[in-house]
């Protein structure tokens, strides 16, 4: 349930009203203070809440029930876009465009530091790289694990770029203490025990959409994290499984405006995993920026033919440089 209060409401009136709601209806209250009004989101069993009684209060502007099962991720509860500060120079969701770039898998110190310096020169503001790799085949390379995390930190020290990397299991959370953004992969989107534990952290979370997940299921996964107290969630569309087999997945561009309408959370697009082919990354990335994405996560490798994983969809540093300049130019044109 959403309650919009009048601009003239005093802090004392708000405190008394909130306490009465909690006492009478046993609900939790999510509060959002806007420029012109304050919005209260009632979370819990609101079926017994007397709307007519609430509407009759002098400080109440309007009341409406929320039918969607996700509450904290719902734009009705939080009308303005959420902006997540990652570092002193990177805030995602504030209207700027950010690119997370780097290899699918961390392979060596020389590789990850070299790529980090290269993508930084091209305008990337975050470094992505896989230390733990979920693979379809149990025989495929699974990542350098803890060593990979250490190498990412070395690259961050060399460039200052915040690092983004994927977590696989609850028991690894302590290992990610010094990671700037924790990525939850598509295969773990509905690993609810992991999501609940991440909700107890204060780390920004990049939540990828599951291979066959609906938008509501995706938002409900975000809700698991937010319900635990962590509201630093970014939603990453990486393509879904459809009847089409030419591309690795089908990028759902429509998900960008849909999420923007339904939720206040930032939207990141992964054209690399959607395409599965490097030559498709540029047009898909351009389409994502035009549709309103807050950022992109793009795979870049210094030697794609010999990459330990996902070389076919990786850009070379030179290709990334060209793509990045086009993306920032497009963003600038759209902002004018």
Image: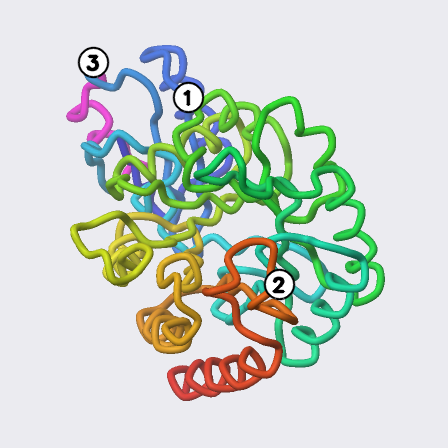
Q: Nearer the viewer, residue 90 or 75?
A: 90
Q: Tag 2, which secondary structure?
A: strand
Q: Which residue is pictured at 59% across the width and 43% down the height?
A: 141
Q: Position of residue 47 (x, y in %)?
A: 19, 17
**To which residue does mark 2 refer?**
102
- Marks 2/3 in contact by CB < 8 Å: the verdict is no
Q: Position of residue 323 (x, y in %)?
A: 49, 81
**Which one is earlier in the sequence, the residue at label 1 or at label 2?**
1
Q: CA distance from mark 1 to mark 3?
A: 14 Å
Mark number for residue 48? 3
Q: With respect to residue 171, does 323 lie above or below?
A: below
- Marks 1/3 in contact by CB < 8 Å: the verdict is no
84 left or right, relative to 220: right
Q: With respect to residue 308, does 77 lie above or below?
A: above
**To which residue does mark 1 refer?**
28
157 left or right, relative to 30: right
Q: Tag 1, which secondary structure?
A: strand
Q: Which residue is pictured at 78% across the width and 42% down the height?
A: 147
Closer to viewer: mark 2 or mark 3: 2
Boundaries of the magenta span: 48-60
159 left or right, relative to 51: right
| Quadrant of the drawing holding the N terminus | top left
Q: CA distance from mark 1 to mark 2?
A: 41 Å
Q: Nearer the viewer, residue 232 or 12?
A: 232
Q: Position of residue 252 (x, y in %)?
A: 26, 58
Report crowding for label 2: few under 14, some 14 to 19, many 20 or more residues within 10 A (C-alpha): many
Report crowding for label 3: few under 14, some 14 to 19, many 20 or more residues within 10 A (C-alpha): few
Q: Nearer the viewer, residue 326 or 131?
A: 131
Q: Tag 3, which secondary structure?
A: loop
Does the magenta segment cover residue 53? yes
Does the magenta segment cover residue 193? no
| Quadrant of the drawing holding the C terminus | bottom left
């Amino acid at each position: 349930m959403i309650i919009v209060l009048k601009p003239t409401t005093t802090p004392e009136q708000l405190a008394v009203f909130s306490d009465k709601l909690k006492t009478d209806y046993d609900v939790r209250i999510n509060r959002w203070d806007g420029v012109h009004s304050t919005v209260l989101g009632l979370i819990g069993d609101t079926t017994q809440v007397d709307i007519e009684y609430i509407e009759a209060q002098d400080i109440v502007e309007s009341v409406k029930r929320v039918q969607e099962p996700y509450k904290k991720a719902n734009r009705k509860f939080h009308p303005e876009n959420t902006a997540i500060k990652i570092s002193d120079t990177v805030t995602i969701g504030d209207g700027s465009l950010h690119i997370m770039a780097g290899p699918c898998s961390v392979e060596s110190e020389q590789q990850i530091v070299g790529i980090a310096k290269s993508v930084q020169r091209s305008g990337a503001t975050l470094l992505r790289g896989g230390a733990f790799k979920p693979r379809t085949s149990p025989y495929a390379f699974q990542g350098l694990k803890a060593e990979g995390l250490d190498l990412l930190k070395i690259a961050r020290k060399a460039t200052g770029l915040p690092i983004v990397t994927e977590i696989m299991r609850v028991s690894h959370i302590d290992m990610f203490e010094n990671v700037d953004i924790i990525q939850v992969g598509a295969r773990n989107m509905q690993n609810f025990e992991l999501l609940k534990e991440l909700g107890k952290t204060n780390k920004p979370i990049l939540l990828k959409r599951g291979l066959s997940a609906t938008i509501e299921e995706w938002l409900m996964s975000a809700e698991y994290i937010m319900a635990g107290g962590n509201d630093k969630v970014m939603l990453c569309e990486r393509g879904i499984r459809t009847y089409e087999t030419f591309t690795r997945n089908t990028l759902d561009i429509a998900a960008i405006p849909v999420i923007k309408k339904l939720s206040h959370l930032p939207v990141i697009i992964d054209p690399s995993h959607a395409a599965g082919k490097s030559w498709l990354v540029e047009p898909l990335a351009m389409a994502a920026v035009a549709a309103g994405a807050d950022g992109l996560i793009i795979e870049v490798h210094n030697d794609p033919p010999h990459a330990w994983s996902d070389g076919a969809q990786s850009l070379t540093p030179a290709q990334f440089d060209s793509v990045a300049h086009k993306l920032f130019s497009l963003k600038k044109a759209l902002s004018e």
